[in-house]
Amino acid sequence: CGLYLHTNAHRLRQIVAQCYRNVDYFIAQITKLIPSEQIIHPKHSLTVCFTPPPSLTTMDKYSVMPVKMPLSPTTPYAGVCLLINVGPTMINHFLAEYRRDLAKMKVHNERHADAVHNKVGLIQ
C-alpha cells in the first residue's frame, strides 16, 4: 500500500480523511461514557485526550499515552492518536475495556468514600 506521492496526493488525502473519520467516531462513542467536558480534541488533530484515564493494563494494551495538561496539572489524562490502523473495530474493543475500567473506578471510589466516611464517623 504505497502513497504514490510521485503521481499525486490522492491516496494520502484518502488516508487522512479516514483518520479524521476515525477521530469523529471515537469522540462520538466516548461521549457516551464520559461527559464531553472531559474530552480535549484540538482542531485539525488526530489526537484526543480524555479523563479519567483507563487502567494501566488497558493503556498498555492499546498504546494509550498518559498526558499532563498544563492548565490542569493534577488531573490525569490519557491520549490516543487515531491513525489509519485504528478503525471502528479497534475503537469499539478499546471502549468496551474502558467501560469496564470506569465501572471498576466507580466501585473503588464508592468504597473509598465509604471508608473515609466511616473513618470520619469514628473520629467524631
Image (tube, rainbow, N blue to C red):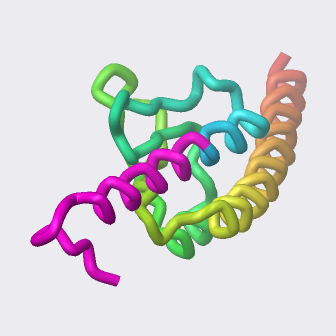
Residue 116: x, y in percent? Answer: 79, 32
As drawn, which residue projects farthest toward the left? Answer: 6
Quarter of the figure that contains the C terminus: top right
Q: Nearer the viewer, residue 75 or 63?
A: 63
Residue 47: x, y in percent? Answer: 40, 46
Q: Nearer the viewer, residue 111 or 48?
A: 48
Taking the magenta stretch, the answer to whether it contains residue 19 is yes
Over which residues does the magenta segment extend? 1-24
Task: Look at 85% across and 26% down and name the residue there.
Answer: 117
Q: Nearer the viewer, residue 121 or 76?
A: 76
Q: Quadrant of residue 8?
A: bottom left
Task: Look at 63% across and 46% down and name the residue there.
Answer: 25
Q: Main secondary structure of the magenta part?
A: helix
89 with respect to 9 (left or right): right
Residue 60: x, y in percent? Answer: 51, 72
Task: Look at 78% across and 60% down and name the residue there.
Answer: 96
27 with respect to 6 (left or right): right
Question: Does 7 appear above or below 101?
Answer: below
Question: Does 2 appear above or below 85?
Answer: below
Q: Quadrant of residue 39?
A: top right
Quarter of the figure that contains the N terminus: bottom left
